[in-house]
Image: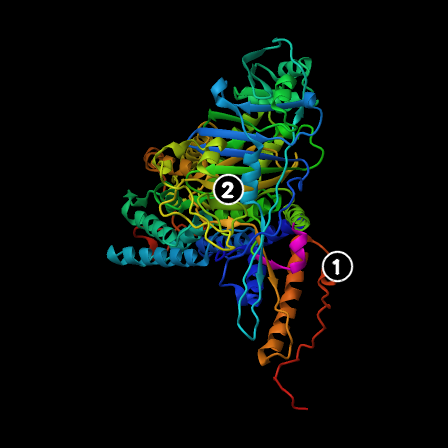
Amino acid sequence: MFATLRAAAVVTAASATLLASPAAHAFCGFYVGRADASLFNEASQVIVVRDATHTVISMQNDFKGDAREFALVVPVPQVLQRGQINVGERKLFEHIDAYSGPRLVEYFDPDPCARAERDRMFKSQVAAAPAAKPAAPMQDKALGVTVEAQYTVGEYDIVILSAKESDGLETWLTQNGYRIPRGASKALAPYIRQNMKFFVAKVNLVERAKTGLTWLRPLQFAFDSEKFMLPIRLGMINAQGPQDLVIYLLTKNGRVETTNYRTVKLPANMDVPVYLKNEFPAFYKSLFDAQAKRENLRAVFTEYVWDMNWCDPCAADPLSADELRQAGVFWLDGPAAAPGSPPIAPPPAGVMPRRMPMPGGAHQVMLTRLHVRYAPDTFPEDLMFQETKDRENFQARYVLRHPWKGDPNACPEARGYLDAVAQRQEKEAQTLASLTNWRIEDIRARMSLKPPAPRNWWEGLWKQGGAK
Amino acid sequence: MEAGRREVSVALAGLAARLPRIDPRLYQIAFQATLLCIGVVARDFTLRWEQMALAFAAGLATQILWTRLLGLPRVGVLSAVITCFGLSLLLRADSLWVHPLAACLALSAKFVVRINGKHLFNPANLGVIIGIGLLPGAWVSPGQWGNDLAYAVWFVALGAIVTQRARRWDISWTFLACWLGLVALRVAWLGQSWNIWLHQLGSGALLLFAFFMISDPMTIPNRSTGRAIYALVVAMIAFFWQFVLFKPNALMWALFVATPLVPLLDRWLPASRFVWRAPASSPAPDKRLHAPTLG
């Protein structure tokens, strides 16, 4: 996508690349740090696996309150059997988040005199965390509500409900101790009209004690649906301000985008000041805030699109076949996952955290990571998706370029190089200010940069050299 | 700001009225170019300039070759330019060959698939359908315009002028009325928030379709009654596609699927065929265009 006719972002990226060309041919390096998963408050994470009508959804909760208060209500197209529901591992989310998160890479300029190179790079990433709905115990079926099925899976008690009208459902949920917000019936009604069922989960305290875990594990369910969508409207009933949602979509063929909202790639692949090395989470958070605001909370952002067989650079290893299956990728049992075919190339020796694609591709899995910040008025409809045939990779990658530090008089090239570095750093400061809306003066101060001296338009016009 | 826009569109309309002899297709080309610029500058269209250049090269070459091959009078390349702009606005691909191939096939169909001297398929629509239906690595991003009302106003203002110049503006409004009516019924029936209806109303893809695709006067019924029926049918198919089958790109597929209705409606409700460059006031069309019209 770098050669495309893309907005102002590309202009910035292109100019940054021009100024920072010395080490651009080598692409290797290693990790620096990683951003904390709690970066985005009020965030949920969802993995959606989809091919044809088969759909597997995993929902990760970061519910921190009293487990008795926890409840999850998700509209589903059919009554789910016990075998269609599973409790997964939180590790899975941590891994897929680490693999696909925004990253920082780092290069070191070569000595302009010696041409000796030390290329390195870094990265890290960012994650998110979920939200839930309040609840309590249940009692009875009435009010047009039918308990279609009832299971205990892991630490969850799950009921599948069907309802005739939304007021009845709201009353039923309230009577059964689910603390659903006022006005819920209005949001539930459209799903009832479409004959959808409701997957309602709460925590079984006895079973939870047996797990010995202090957190709630992700709930997963598999079903068939013509609709490639994610119901986000229910989560907005009691929303206080905008919410964040990170969606990992695993598909066979190509990138996924929303059809009823704009899907925008985050500005990426830009040079930013090296002091961000220790502040990447704060930087990325500000960047996302600024971009979301710029789009008036009306766009869905693409953070990562990659073939699951490889990565370059790798923020984490790609998911193994086993992990993919845990996530719900159901098509791996075919010839693609034949025993004996190593799923991933071994990591090359040295410090290069990258994995090259296997010829033919070990798994046929594309990962699209979307990040949406939504508010009730800017996202009036549930998210509708389509899988495109686009297989072009994309990652939210930001580049640090460490200048060579040496004697300006070491060789004739050194002074020219240092002048170019000064220009480049000013450009980096401007890029950072534009990406994050941080004050340029503060950035320059952090970088110990002087504001560029005002320059007369005619300076350098005739290259007069030393002539006085 | 809104008032300013209204003034601009009124001024444009006034200007258009004073320049009756300019081929309406030139207006359409100007507006499509404007939209493409907006898309590329303000909306991050994943369109490469090479794809666009190849689409135009292949499209124009196809038009010229077929005109010469069939020994047709020189009808110019304006329609081909419109088709190429349409494909650039709508079709996305991860390779360079999809756009030229789609342009070539779409424009060839204009010369080959003809019924009673009128070409059957809307070339841009056919190109898009060939892309998403047959070619690997091609897709349409219906969400690419977003739902900003400002854009919606622009679309309407620009589109209305273009279609008025082309004298077949009725189908755009009929289609919009039918489609938005069906969406309104659905919203009411499901008890959804009316913001959903407004969201649909502000969809750039919808307005683009209504004003720049279905309005092509050469591939819609000649009689206004026929056009009204056609608009209704397209809206119903699109509604079924989107809200019953839950498939993407409903508008594109609906227009394609409904295309065979056009010759049937023309037979049932005959009327004189549309001719480019014939101002409403002058009944005698340009002689050079009397022969097979290839708009």
Determine if the magenta segment contains residue A272.
yes
Q: A141 or A342: which is nearer to us? A: A342
Mark 2 closeness class: few <14, some 14–19, many ≥20 residues within 10 Å? many
Provide residue A442's location: percent of width, then percent of height.
75, 59
- Per the model, the C-alpha gap separating discs 1 and 2 is 35 Å
| Nearer-N-terminus badge (1/2) | 2
Q: Is residue B273 above or below residue A452?
A: above
Q: Is residue B277 above or below residue A203?
A: below
The disc at residue A442 is: 1
Name the chain letter of the residue that bears numbered label 1.
A
Provide residue B98's location: percent of width, then percent of height.
37, 50
Provide residue B33's location: percent of width, then percent of height.
49, 55
Q: A322 or A2: which is nearer to us? A: A322
- Is residue B101 in sight in this rendering? yes
Dot 2: what SS? strand
Provide residue A115's location: percent of width, then percent of height.
53, 72
Instruction: Look at label 1 and name its amino acid.
Output: Asp
Dot 2 corresponds to which residue?
A: A368
Q: Is residue B217 above or below residue B17?
A: above
Question: Range of the magenta residues?
Answer: A270-280
- Is residue B189 in sight in this rendering? no
Q: A267 or A411: which is nearer to us? A: A411
> Tags 1 and 2 in contact by the CB under 8 Å rule?
no
Instruction: Look at label 2 and name its amino acid.
Output: Thr
Residue drawn at (48%, 26%), measured in percent from left and top?
A: A222
Dot 1: what SS? helix
Instruction: Tell me the quarter of the image containing the C terminus of chain A.
Output: bottom right
**In the displayed image of the protein, which residue is found farthest to the front?**
A349
